[in-house]
Image (tube, grey):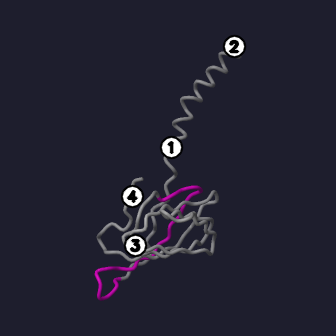
């Protein structure tokens, strides 16, 4: 009888906890560390360069950048999911480029990732804009 009650208690607890765990938000990537910025003469834009660190399986949610960007994977594995395109898996030494306003998600693999990126944007305006599904 005690065993049956223990099993019932365990199952009830699992039914309460599992939906909460299943709906948990993905781990967020760290804020990109901006290491350089330079004005692009003759324009209202600047070129930025930064390092993005992703803990294991962390992601930058679905978003678009308001300017073009280039990125190089320094360490680990990065998964790039661009709307309407096949998913790309990049390892250390791999790179990618995105035009302005391309909706995408970037996510680390299980071993984390470190990326150096450059981008062009208008200073004082948001660069990354979240795009809901």
Residue 103 within the segment the image draws in magenta? no
In the picture as drawn, the residue positioned furthest to the bottom comes out as: 42
Q: Secondary structure at mark 3?
A: loop
Tell me the residue that label 3 is attached to: 100
Residue 131 is labelled as 4
Q: Is residue 2 above or below residue 32?
A: above
Q: Nearer the viewer, mark 1 or mark 4?
A: 4
Classify residue 125 by image quadrant.
bottom left
Q: Separation of disc 3 and disc 2 at Cα?
A: 63 Å
Report x, y in % for residue 14.
59, 29
Q: Within 10 Å of the Cα at label 1, are there few (<14), some (14-19), or many (20+) other Cα atoms?
A: few
Q: Separation of disc 2 and disc 1 at Cα?
A: 33 Å
Q: Nearer the viewer, mark 2 or mark 1?
A: 1
Q: Specify start and end residues of the magenta stretch as a single range.
A: 39-60
Which residue is at the front of the view, 61 or 111?
61
Report x, y in % for residue 112.
60, 60
Residue 24 is labelled as 1
Report x, y in % for residue 32.
46, 66
Q: Is residue 39 above or below residue 60?
A: below
- Evaluate if marks 3 and 4 touch, with contact meaning CB atoms under 8 Å apart: no
Q: Is residue 7 above or below residue 94?
A: above
- Seen at 43% across and 64% down, the residue is 103
Q: Separation of disc 4 and disc 2 at Cα?
A: 52 Å
Q: Secondary structure at mark 2?
A: helix
Tell me the residue that label 2 is attached to: 2
């Amino acid at each position: 009888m005690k065993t049956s009650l223990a099993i019932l208690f365990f199952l009830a607890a699992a039914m309460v906890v599992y939906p909460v765990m299943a709906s948990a938000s993905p781990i967020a990537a760290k804020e990109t560390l901006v290491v350089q910025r330079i004005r692009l003469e003759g324009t209202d834009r600047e070129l930025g360069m930064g390092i993005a660190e992703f803990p294991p399986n962390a992601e930058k949610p679905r978003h678009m950048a308001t300017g073009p960007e280039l990125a190089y994977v320094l360490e680990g594995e990065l998964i790039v999911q661009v709307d309407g395109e096949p998913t790309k898996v990049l390892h250390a030494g791999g790179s990618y480029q995105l035009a302005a306003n391309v909706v995408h998600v970037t996510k680390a693999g299980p071993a984390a990732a470190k990326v150096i990126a450059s981008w062009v944007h208008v200073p004082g305006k948001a660069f990354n804009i979240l795009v809901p599904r």
